[in-house]
Image (cartoon, grey):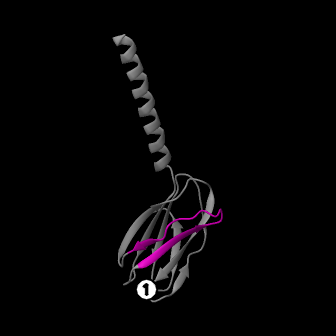
Amino acid sequence: MRRRKAAIIGVVAVAAFTAAGIATALFWSRPHLRVANSTSTTAIVEIQTDVAEVYAPVSVAAHDSATLRVSGRDKLLWLVVHRADGQVMNSKSIYVTTGISVSSHITDDSVAITYGQ
């Protein structure tokens, strides 16, 4: 009986560690977006896509940056930046897929977006 319990516990432990490993791999393979705000005011950043995914707006403080993750599905994405003075700026769109990194730089008059960090 003890051997059977030990075998069952071993199988459950292996299954749990396997599931955790798969979940971790899926999380880290998702595209990520690094947003740097070089303005003197906080920017509210929205991610928009061509596949109607919705992401919560993120506040990026002046002279600060944030790293955001998006789903791993292939898509075009772009940023909509709302500044404290009411100005709204859009970046160009960029194609992302699993494991890609994208960088964005917010200045007083533009939002640049490129591949890489």
Label 1 sits on a secondary structure element that is loop
Residue matched to label 1: 84
Left or right of residue 100, residue 52 in this image = right
- Mark 1 belongs to which amino acid? Ala
Residue bounds of the magenta highlight:
43-60
**Front residue of 29 and 16:** 16
- Measuring 38% from the left and 83% from the top, which residue is drawn there? 41
Say which quarter of the image contains residue 11.
top left
Residue at the image position 65 percent from the left and 65 percent from the top = 50
Q: Position of residue 4 (x, y in %)?
A: 40, 13
Q: Is residue 49 highlighted in magenta?
A: yes
Vertically, is 42 above or below 103? below
Depicted 20 relative to depicted 117: above or below: above
Q: Position of residue 95 (x, y in %)?
A: 61, 62
Q: Position of residue 28 (x, y in %)?
A: 46, 49
Q: Quadrant of residue 79?
A: bottom right
Q: Is 59 positioned to the left or the right of 87 in the image?
A: left
Q: How many marks?
A: 1
Q: Relative to 29, is 17 above or below? A: above
Q: Is residue 48 magenta?
A: yes
Residue 44 coordinates in the image, percent (x, y): 45, 76
Q: Residues within 10 Å of mark 1 (few under 14, many from 20)?
A: few
